[in-house]
Amino acid sequence: MRDLVYSGSEWIGKTPVEWEIGRIDSFYTLRNTKVSDKDYPPLSVTMKGVLPQLETAAKTNAHDDRKLVRKGDFAINSRSDRRGSCGISNYDGSVSLINTILAPKGDMNPNYYDWLFHTVQFSDEFYKWGHGIVDDLWTTNYQDMKKINIPVPPIDEQKRIADFLSKICGEIDSLSDEIRQQIETLELYKRSIITETVTKGLNKSISLKNSGIEWAESIPEHWKVMPNKYIMKKIKQICPKYNGEDILSLTMNGVIVRDLDAGGKMPTSFDGYQWVYKGNLLMCLFDYDVTPRCIGLIKNDGLTSPAYSQFVMKNGNSAEYYYYYYLMIDFTKELLHLAKNLRHSFTEDQLGVINAPVPPITEQVAIAEYLNEECKKIDAVSEKKQEQLEVLANYKKTVIYEYVTGKKEVLNGEF
């Protein structure tokens, strides 16, 4: 066990007695050359490092308002809402002016400091030195950043730490990727069960017929097909005044109560907000290409945005069955293809003329109960695997911090 001593910086904590403590400007110089992305390819500084500019990145016509990045430079986004976006560039190129570009100098191992700067503790310290009026405009400039204290291990130990972390974190990342693939496989399995069951029913030996519906080609012979307007009806009851009711949102996890105590934002206005009721369907009938989930089952009364459409079932039809049916359609965004011809939205009348299968009510209920049970089992397995991912992510963060600050030692020949 090596001897540790307090470094003098809270974010670093204790370090080995033989390590030194220095400042960032002892090992990096600021590169602040203004260039054009017409001369230097545009790059993005992301959580995964410095990459060729992403297609989703916000574009600007100010092509000359860029900063030069050279291969081997370290780039970090100075804004607090881009926390953790940093890395060593493998390219010559240009980045947004919001980024700070550091060129390494002197006797140091850039890969060691790359690991150091990716720790949560450094990120927190970095933003402590920032300035701004509000959180999302909070920035840390180089004049402050350069003063931050950093550990300085012997150069040979810097290399051992960097190499070790590349190996161990690579193994963690590989295991995490495998678990993510398992979660994705479970999701695909869940989708296949939903699709098969809402279109074919529970009796797999029954005769089928052509439904005439593009996304539900074959259905049981005794099922009916009819337009949505005979299955469900849109209702809208405007709430005249907010009196502390639950605020509901349609999300990838269903229709949920917005948790205002956990940072959920209160609407700036309740104009047009509507009552919604347990047991009805909630749909988003516009912007299909940007809405993650367009169907949900309302599980408790409350208020929701006027952007959503609430449907009550007709003639005893099961809201749960049609929730799963429209969830199947939403998986592949089938309505998006139709909506694109309608300026990305549907009216109640347009949705109403679209045909849907109509099993007998008893079958609708049985199908919904079966899918509730099966999806619950699959979701339970997925949640366990998601917990495994969180454990690995936390372990990785701990490993990186403990080794880059010397609290754990990489011995010669250890790997």
Image: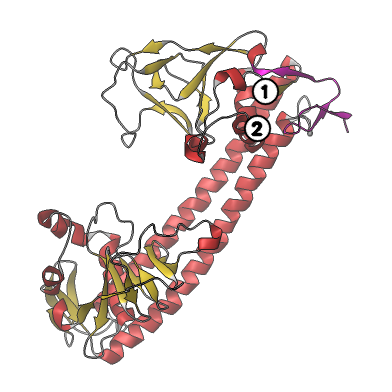
Gap in angstroms between the C-alphas marked 2 and 1: 8 Å
Residue drawn at 29 percent across, 27 percent down:
60
Assess whether mark 1 and mark 2 are in contact (beta carbons under 8 angstroms): yes
Left or right of 96 in this view: 326? left
Q: Position of residue 231 (x, y in %)?
A: 19, 82
**Along the viewing direction, whichever of 256 and 164 lies nearer the viewer:** 256
Residue depicted at x 33% and y 56%: 292
- Decide which of 396, 27 is in the foreground and name it: 27
- Residue 103 percent across, percent down from the top left: 54, 13
Provide the secondary structure element on which disc 2 rests. Answer: helix
Earlier in the chain: of badge 2 and badge 1, it is 2
Q: Is residue 16 visible?
A: yes
Please say if 29 is above or below 414.
Answer: above
Identity of the residue drawn at 20% across and 61% down: 334
Q: Is residue 353 left or right of residue 186?
A: left
Circle number at residue 125? 2
Residue beneath disc 1: 148
Query: Which residue is located at x 80 percent, y 27 percent?
Result: 8
Residue 342: name its quadrant.
Answer: bottom left
Labelled disc at residue 286? none
Q: Which residues are magenta?
A: 1-24
Q: Which quadrant is the N terminus positioned in?
A: top right
Type of the residue with mark 2: Glu
User: Whole-percent x and y of residue 310?
Assistant: 27, 74
Give yes or no for residue 15 being in the magenta stretch. Answer: yes
Mark 1: amino acid = Ile
Q: Is residue 118 visible?
A: no
Viewer-side residue, 157 vs 118: 118
